[in-house]
Image (cartoon, helix red, strand yellow):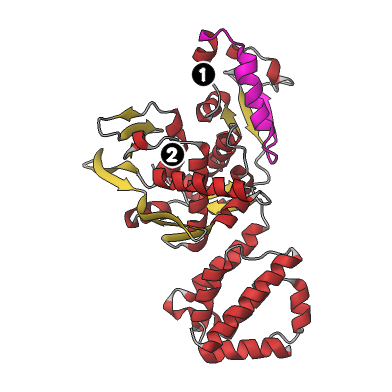
């Protein structure tokens, strides 16, 4: 960078810090984004912005002190963009406007209970792998079918910890960062990941353990491939494998560094992103809260606009639960289904703070106290979810209706 661009970079960083101190929206991982914005600004424009900021002429209606008091980095980002010619010039190369747009999107999303997360059929099937009886071959590789997707995990037998909720949580966090940046290469500071997981304020030892957890999860995620299919003469046939990772999966200098396989990117872009609740990543991984919360978000994405969107069968949710025994295991051990399955099931649902739901019996009536149901009645029930706080997507719904009508 030139000295003028470095000065602009310093101004943007300091403004971001002021926003953070003021409790306003701010970029959680600003360095890379703001550095690129500064690099894409011509030196003379960068120098003028810094000079006008210091004299109070950057935005005539507000003095620098007023701008500082607002604590909003987005104001300065917009002004940088407009000084660079807005959509008439600065983004002629195709990348500069994207830098501002993603920075602003991140600022806006930080104030919302949901973020956008790229997804496809294979990504959404991943959390179901833990329920699969993985087949281990003589080389220690595992194969398993989850929700109709065939996965291969190289060297699975040598990974002592195996698939855990934390593995999927990290995968979701990486997908969220991809959706924000649209960059194939992800850089996620451990401190930011800890914040996403609700682990801020933890001790050094706890953060050290988080690093170990991330390194293990990265190793596992980097070894996963899934079977692809294509339509040939009207039939779906196997077409080979796609590995999720593109080669880099490390933690270096306190930053998680990951890149996606180039051939996976088009699959992530084919479908609109999911509205993913921030609360999902803060779940206690020892419970089923993460798996329930994620599926509730996924169900809305898949079924928005359909009559059945609000109704999820208890049988379906049980199939997502990692930390509940099966009814066969409970009965074999002569344990109580109420104590081992039904009560923990509703405990974990009730711990999802954003979730409002009713339990609906087979006859369609609301059940006032579902924790006292016998198992055979419980398994035939559904929950009716209140999705009113979720963002609506009219264009997606219209597109789905048109697709159904033309089938």
Residue 277 seen in render? no
Quadrant (top left/top right/bottom left/bottom right) for the C terminus: top left
What residue is rendered at 66% in x and 55% in y? 112
Q: Is residue 335 above or below residue 207?
A: above
Q: Is residue 139 above or below residue 115?
A: above
- Front residue (pair 278, 206): 206
Q: Is residue 32 magenta?
A: no
Q: Which residue is mark 1?
A: 326
Q: Is residue 340 magenta?
A: yes
- Residue 284 in percent (x, y) is at 62, 37
What residue is rendered at 60% in x and 51% in y? 194
- Front residue (pair 45, 362): 45
Task: Examine the image and state in which quarter residue 340 appears.
Answer: top right
Q: Secondary structure at mark 2?
A: helix
User: Furthest-front residue in view?
Assistant: 205
Q: Which residue is mark 2?
A: 126
From the viewer's perspective, is 75 left or right of 193? right
Q: Is residue 367 above or below residue 41?
A: above
- Residue 32 in percent (x, y) is at 51, 69
Residues packed near mark 1 inside 10 Å, few (<14), some (14 to 19) or many (20 plus) = some
The span shown in magenta is: 332-360
């Amino acid at each position: 960078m030139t000295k003028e661009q470095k000065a602009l970079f310093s101004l943007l960083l300091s403004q971001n810090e002021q926003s953070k101190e003021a409790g306003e929206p701010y970029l959680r991982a600003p360095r890379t984004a703001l550095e690129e914005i500064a690099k894409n600004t011509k030196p003379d424009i960068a120098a003028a912005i810094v000079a006008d900021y210091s004299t109070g002429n950057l935005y005539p209606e507000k003095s620098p002190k007023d701008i500082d008091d607002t604590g909003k980095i987005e104001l300065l980002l917009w002004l940088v963009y407009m000084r660079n010619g807005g959509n008439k010039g600065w983004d002629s190369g195709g990348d500069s406007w994207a830098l501002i747009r993603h920075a602003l999107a991140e600022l806006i999303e930080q104030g919302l209970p949901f973020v956008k997360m790229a997804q496809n059929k294979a990504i959404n099937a991943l959390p179901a792998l833990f329920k699969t009886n993985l087949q281990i071959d003589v080389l220690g590789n595992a194969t398993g079918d989850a929700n109709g997707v065939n996965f291969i995990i190289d060297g699975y037998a040598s990974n002592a910890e195996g698939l855990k909720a934390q593995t999927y949580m990290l995968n979701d966090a990486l997908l969220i960062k991809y959706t924000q940046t649209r960059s194939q290469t992800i850089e996620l500071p451990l401190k930011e990941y800890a914040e996403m997981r609700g682990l801020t304020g933890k001790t050094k030892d706890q953060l050290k353990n988080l690093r170990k957890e991330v390194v293990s999860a990265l190793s596992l995620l980097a070894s996963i491939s899934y079977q692809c299919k294509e339509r040939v003469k009207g039939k779906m046939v196997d077409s080979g494998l796609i590995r999720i990772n593109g080669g880099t999966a490390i933690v270096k200098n306190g930053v998680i560094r990951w890149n996606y396989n180039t051939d996976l990117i088009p699959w992530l872009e084919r479908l609109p992103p999911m509205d993913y609740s921030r609360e999902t990543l803060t779940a206690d991984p020892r419970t089923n809260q993460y798996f329930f919360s994620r599926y509730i978000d996924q169900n809305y994405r898949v079924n928005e606009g359909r009559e059945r969107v609000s109704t999820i069968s208890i049988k379906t949710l049980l199939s997502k639960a990692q930390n509940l025994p099966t009814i066969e295991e409970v009965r074999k051990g002569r344990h109580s289904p109420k104590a081992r399955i039904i009560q923990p099931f509703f405990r974990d649902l009730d711990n999802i703070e954003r979730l409002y739901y009713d339990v609906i019996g087979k006859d369609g009536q609301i059940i006032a106290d579902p924790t006292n149901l016998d198992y055979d009645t419980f398994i035939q029930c559904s929950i009716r979810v209140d999705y009113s706080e979720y963002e609506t997507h009219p264009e997606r719904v219209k597109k789905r209706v048109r697709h159904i009508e033309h089938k």
